[in-house]
Amino acid sequence: MREIGELEVEVGSDAKLARPSLIAFFRDRDHTRGSLLVSVLVLALPSILTTTFSFGVFQLVELSFLGRLGEHALAAAGSSDQVLRQGLMLFVMGMTVASQMMISRLVGSGQVEGAEHVAGQSFVLGAGLALVAALTGGLFPEALVRLIASDPDVIALATVYVRIVFLSFFVMISGQIFSTVLNGAGDATTPMLTSFIVTPVSIFSQWALTFGHAGLPAIGIAGIPAGSAIGGACGAAVSLYMLFSGRCRVHLRARHVVPDLPTLARILTTSLMPAAHMLARSLMVMFFMIMAGRLGGKVQAAYTVGLRLEMLAIMLAFPIANACATLVGQNLGARRLSRAWGAIWASALVELAALWPLALGVFLFRHALVALFVDDAEVARMAEEYLVYSSGILAFYGLYFVAFRTLQAAGDMLSPMLISVSTAVLVGAPLGWLLATRTDLGATGMWIANLVYALVNASAMIGWLLSGRWARRHAI
């Protein structure tokens, strides 16, 4: 049986005795044996760099380009991304959670062919979703835009933006599927290296097309999604070459991308519950944003600033939890339940080591942090108050991420979804409405409700994890 990541070439004795390079050490490590702490770091550090570069830096640069185009361009791109594209991305993220769980379990049990088959079917399912997106957004972009915008200038710009985004959806998501497939197999390094190619290409293409540089015509807001599509196409080409050439831990062949309805159905049905889990959190953010808007534009601005700063924690917490998911999945597949528990504890320690200093820094330096984004004194005051409560959330954010990603990696998609939805419906929304509108607390009531909701949600998720019932029901 071929081991995952085994190169299909013969090597000389000198090569066998040579010490592996740092990249090879990160890329080819066997995560079912050896130090768990090292495995967590080997998987998490490249993912953190990928997230920081591909999302953090890229989003900031893209935002600056949109800002130069004016407020209507910002509104057009912002509303389209937050409502339309994010709706599709929920399904993609649910699919990647399901795929990573299945691939990691198969890799851990030594079923490499099965893991590669699931990887190929993940691309097939992504292509199917992209086809639906292309047909709807390509044919009816204005109808979609009118669901979320009313300003004629915004509608005109957003229609152009949405058409390109939806037509190029497959190349936009191919990098995410590639990263998921390799993460499940235990390689977070190759996606990181690929992102170092794709992100600069995307940024350069956006800059050149939007403003007419490098001999290209200036096409305005259309240059933003077009540039992203060029970068995405570059990434898709590199990713598919790596996969089909056998130069990474998953080797795809033509037979793996022939549609297999039972496997596609399993990935799709498994993906629905993690998608609903993420939808609950997204709807809570939307609910608090609407409540903030009712309290005034300044409250909404303060909440927006707070959310952006919280993204720093997510960019740390999620890659570490994702590393834990891979370790748990592979070790459950290898029938090493005690090692899976060890991966949970190691990941929790790394999360605390990363998030506690960050939470303390946010609390102590909240004035300076808010000053980077806000000039208005009243908005700054409310944003700083929000960060006081938010720092309490950040202190245990990492443990929450480890808990729900562990449950998902073990195949328990239902429990995280039920916990997330029930706490949102029974705690977050009613408490936020009550404290913000039926007391004199105003914005402070919203911040308190958000903290209580996060505490209850995290406590329930961690409590269910520690009960061990997921292990008895899903691990064997």
Image (cartoon, rainbow, N blue to C red):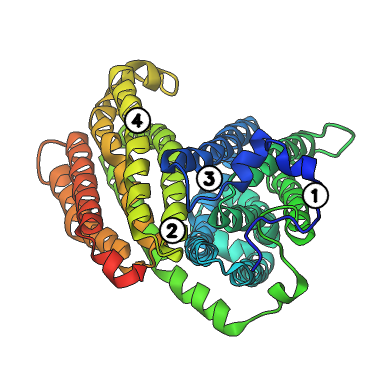
Q: Nearer the viewer, mark 1 or mark 2?
A: 1
Kindly identify the residue that appears in the image at 19 percent across and 44 percent down.
Answer: 449
At label 1, which amino acid type do we have? Answer: Val
Q: Quadrant of residue 213?
A: top right
Q: Residues within 10 Å of mark 1 (few under 14, many from 20)?
A: few
At label 4, which amino acid type do we have? Answer: Ala
Q: CA distance from mark 4 to mark 1?
A: 41 Å
Viewer-proximal residue among 385 and 140: 385
At label 2, which amino acid type do we have? Answer: Asn
Mark 1 highlights which residue? 11
Q: Looking at the image, is mark 3 or mark 1 earlier in the sequence? A: 1
Q: Residues within 10 Å of mark 3 (few under 14, many from 20)?
A: some
Q: Give how far across and how far down residue 325 sits, in percent.
A: 43, 54
Q: Is residue 220 left or right of residue 56?
A: right
Q: Nearer the viewer, mark 3 or mark 2?
A: 2
Label 3's element?
helix
Q: CA distance from mark 1 to mark 2?
A: 29 Å
Mark 2 highlights which residue? 331
Kindly identify the residue that appears in the image at 30 percent across and 35 percent down.
Answer: 394
Q: Is residue 199 above or below residue 422?
A: above
- Locate the C terminus and report the quarter of the image it occupies: bottom left
Label 4's element?
helix
Q: Is residue 126 left or right of residue 273?
A: right
Label 1's element?
loop
Q: Nearer the viewer, mark 3 or mark 4?
A: 4
The image's mark for residue 78 is 3
Q: CA distance from mark 3 to mark 2?
A: 41 Å
The image's mark for residue 438 is none
The image's mark for residue 353 is 4
Q: CA distance from mark 3 to mark 4?
A: 34 Å
Q: Looking at the image, is mark 3 or mark 2 earlier in the sequence? A: 3
Q: Give how far across and how far down residue 279 sits, in percent.
A: 39, 60
